[in-house]
């Protein structure tokens, strides 16, 4: 099936009136479906193996707790980590609240905290541009008032904090993507590529 799909795509690519962008999406979809099938084909394990994997995970959690660390990825919020154990691998976490109560700021705070602690994080923004997000990150890291940052009403002390904060953010493992109208298949393809290139730990979609 995969070979037939690739052959069909190759025929379309040879046509003068080809839609290159649509063709690339189609080919990526073929690859995505194949990888899903391969993943499903290798996900079945017996109880003995499943039990051993669970024990290994419990031992790893115990080791991290003994060392005074969070079982999962530290969010930067001690109370939240005590309730959840941090951001655990393979989990989906939904941040839900009314508009304009700080969901983006909350997500940025967790993303920045994880990224500056060596966990590669990719943030997909469907609402704000890279520049807007970076400005909010500067404000979070430097603790300079966001309004002052927007208006340029900054003191020398503020500038010093911003320079220091920019260095920390620049050295972190945070990647921002503000592609407008990104589709699920495109997002999945980008995550797959980034996982191979950077060893992606967290994906945040705002």
Image (cartoon, helix red, strand yellow):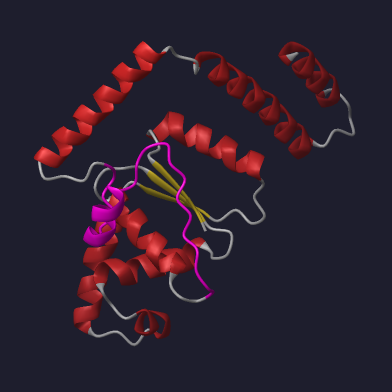
Outermost residue toward the front in this view: 47
**Is residue 183 shown left or right of residue 42?**
right
Q: Main secondary structure of the magenta part?
A: loop
Of the pair 141 and 17, the residue shown nearer to us:
141
**Residue 90 at x, y percent in the picture:** 42, 36
**Residue 106 at x, y percent in the picture:** 38, 65
**Residue 76 at x, y percent in the picture:** 25, 58
For image coordinates 64% across by 57% down, the residue present is: 180
Quadrant of the rendering where the N terminus is positioned: top right
**Is residue 7 shown left or right of residue 154?**
right
Please check the rendered image and state whether residue 90 is part of the magenta-colored stretch, yes or no: yes
Of the pair 22 and 110, the residue shown nearer to us:
110
Outermost residue toward the left in this view: 67
Please check the rendered image and state whether residue 2 is part of the magenta-colored stretch, yes or no: no
Instruction: State whether residue 124 is above or below residue 134.
Output: above
Residue 56, located in which quarter of the rendered image? top left
For image coordinates 36% across by 13% down, the residue present is: 49
Of the pair 145 and 164, the residue shown nearer to us:
145
Instruction: State whether residue 100 is above or below residue 175.
Output: below
Instruction: State whether residue 107 is above or below residue 101.
Output: above
Residue 30, located in which quarter of the rendered image? top right
Instruction: State whether residue 135 is above or below residue 49.
Output: below
For image coordinates 21% across by 82% down, the residue present is: 156
Number of dots carrying numbers: 0
**Residue 129 at x, y percent in the picture:** 53, 64
Give the magenta range: 72-99
């Amino acid at each position: 099936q995969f070979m037939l799909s690739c052959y069909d795509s190759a025929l379309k690519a040879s046509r003068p009136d080809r839609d290159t962008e649509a063709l690339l999406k189609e080919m990526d979809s073929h690859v995505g479906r194949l990888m899903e099938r391969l993943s499903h084909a290798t996900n079945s394990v017996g109880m003995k193996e499943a039990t051993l994997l669970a024990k290994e995970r419990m031992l790893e959690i115990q080791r991290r707790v003994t060392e005074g660390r969070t079982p999962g990825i530290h969010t930067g919020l001690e109370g939240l980590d005590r309730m959840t154990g941090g951001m655990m691998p393979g989990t989906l976490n939904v941040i839900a609240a009314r508009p304009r109560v700080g969901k983006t700021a909350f997500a940025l705070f967790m993303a920045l905290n994880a990224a500056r602690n060596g966990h590669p994080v990719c943030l997909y923004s469907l609402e704000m541009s890279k520049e807007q997000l970076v400005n909010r990150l500067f404000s979070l890291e430097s603790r300079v008032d966001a309004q002052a940052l927007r208006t340029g009403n900054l003191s020398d002390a503020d500038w010093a904090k911003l320079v220091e904060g920019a260095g920390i953010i620049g050295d972190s493992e945070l990647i921002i993507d503000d592609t407008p109208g990104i589709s699920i298949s495109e997002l999945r393809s980008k995550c797959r590529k980034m996982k191979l290139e950077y060893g992606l730990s967290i994906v945040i979609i705002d």
